[in-house]
Amino acid sequence: MTQVHPTALVDPGAELDSSVSVGPYTVIGPHVKVGAGTNIGAHCVIEGHTTIGRDNRIFQFNSLGAIPQDKKYAGEPCELVIGDRNTVREFCTFNIGSPTGGAITSVGNDNWIMAYVHLAHDCRVGNHTIFANNSQLAGHVRVDDWVILGGFTVAHQFVRIGAHAMTAMCSLLFADLPPFVMCQGQPAGARSMNYEGLRRRGFSAPRIAAVKGMHKALYRGDLTLERAMQDIAALGEQTPEAAPDVAMMLDFLKQSSPQRGIVR
């Protein structure tokens, strides 16, 4: 049977797998679904239309699925969807989506989310990310796979953070952070590429060399963004092994709005 502490309040409408455990004084609402093997600590509040996958570890004092901090929200049945094998440390706040942003806030699989992290409405977080303490995302922020956010990183609404990117502590993002880029500052400026992270993830020498070429085109050649994209496209032809990495970078840059731009 589901291991629910006697002091926890679980609505009869909630759907909890029989292997789920729920700690003392936790409150779970009627529209919540929790998958097999997930452990929910003490003093958590999980509400709204929230779906949590398998084998997650949710520590004490978390608020998941509360309504968005959006004055336009009028009670619509928006969602929070959390995948599998995530660790969510203490005092995190993940809000449901909003009708104007797709109605879903989502977190993928295998993420390591430390204390006091805030995910506002309609944020989309990929897989294998690390959010250090006090990382804060405003509404509609997109974080792709393998991103690492340093402590106290703050992202403005609608900002996108590309795969394998990394921020230093106390970085402030007003612009999109392209894939592979390491940034630091208030506002954040590009400092290098995340070469060590790529090596740890098994990137070959030719792929890392192509990433270095992308860094040169974007940040060291004093080129316009259009010209830099042309040089980056050529890297994919010169190094077929890196073609998917080049395509990912080009796709990211093409989606960047002129008003927001990219971290430079």
Image: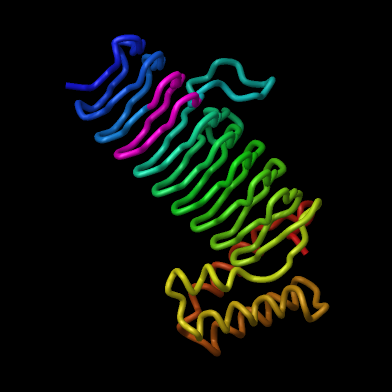
Q: Is residue 62 left or right of residue 31?
A: right
Which residue is rendered at x = 43% and y = 46% of the image?
A: 108
| Residue 60 magenta | yes
Which residue is rendered at x = 36% and y = 14% of the image?
A: 30
Which residue is rendered at x = 57% and y = 28% of the image?
A: 99
Residue 227, image x and y in percent?
A: 75, 78
> Which of these two is toward me, 108 or 199?
199
The quadrant the C terminus occupies is bottom right
Which residue is rendered at x = 40% and y = 13% of the image?
A: 25
Q: How many labels were placed on the picture?
A: 0
Farthest residue in the left direction?
Answer: 1
Does 35 appear above or below 156?
A: above
| Residue 63 magenta | no
The quadrant the N terminus occupies is top left
Does 184 appear above or below 38?
A: below
> Which of these two is toward me, 64 or 116?
116
Farthest residue in the right direction?
Answer: 222
The quadrant holding residue 75 is: top right
Residue 147, image x and y in percent?
A: 55, 56
The quadrant holding residue 121 is: top right
Does 221 appear above or below 263?
A: below
The quadrant holding residue 215 is: bottom right
Magenta highlight range: 41-62
| Scheme of colours in the image | rainbow
- Dominant secondary structure of the residues highlighted in magenta in the image: loop
Residue 236, image x and y in percent?
A: 55, 82
Residue 82, image x and y in percent?
A: 41, 37
> Which of these two is toward me, 254 or 221?
221
Q: Is residue 85 left or right of residue 91?
A: left
Farthest residue in the bottom direction?
Answer: 238
